Image: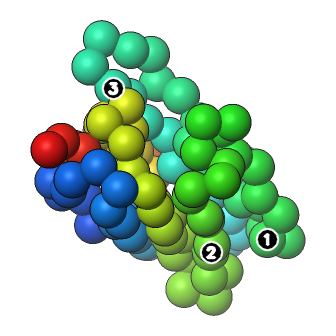
Amino acid sequence: QVRLVESGGGLVQPGESLRLSCAASGSIFSIGAMGWYRQGPGKQRELVASTASDGSANYADSVKDRFSISRDNFKSTVQLEMNDLKPEDTAVYLCHANVLGPAIIWNDYWGQGTQVTVSS
């Protein structure tokens, strides 16, 4: 079993910054894609940013000039640095990881989510 634990959400004003962190633990042989999704009120879940094991990253168009994703393969962690936050960034942010386990099968895992609220 694999567990993803997120931290770093909160309430900020427009223009401020937040840093989200996610740590994976459990029966992990390897992690492929690891990143962040979000789900705003009344909206579908959407990709925010994701990074492959080689460090390459992709971003949603709405955040690519403001957010930065990084990962530490040794620690099985991923971070999301969010700058110049806007009210439309308000959402529950969920950590995602595609994990190779002992059965040599890739599975998707999700964290419980952390709330980010941007409001003046």
Left or right of 30? Residue 118 is left
Above or below, comparing residue 45 to residue 49 in the picture:
above
Amino acid at pointer 2: Arg
Quickly name the residue at label 3.
Answer: 40
Q: Tell me the tag on residue 95.
A: none
Quickly name the residue at label 2.
Answer: 71
Q: Nearer the viewer, mark 3 or mark 2?
A: 3
Residue displayed at 85% across by 71% down: 54
Residue displayed at 62% across by 75% down: 71
Nearer to the camera, 53 or 58: 58
Q: Are marks 1 and 2 in contact (CB under 8 Å)?
A: yes
Q: Position of residue 27 (x, y in %)?
A: 52, 68
Q: Secondary structure at mark 1?
A: loop
Q: Secondary structure at mark 2?
A: strand
Q: Quadrant of the N terminus?
A: bottom left
Above or below, comparing residue 110 to residue 40 in the picture:
below
Q: Position of residue 17 (x, y in %)?
A: 36, 65
Amino acid at pointer 1: Gly
Query: Dot 1: within a 10 Å radius of its alpha carbon, few (fewer than 14), some, or many (20 or more) residues?
Result: some
Query: Dot 2: within a 10 Å radius of its alpha carbon, few (fewer than 14), some, or many (20 or more) residues?
Result: many
Quickly name the residue at label 1.
Answer: 55
Q: How far apart are the two marked residues, 3 and 2, measured between alpha carbons?
A: 24 Å
Give the mark nearest the N terminus, 3 or 1.
Answer: 3
Residue displayed at 30% across by 11% down: 42
Q: Are marks 3 and 2 in contact (CB under 8 Å)?
A: no
Give the mark nearest the N terminus, 1 or 2.
Answer: 1
From where the camera sits, is residue 109 visible? no
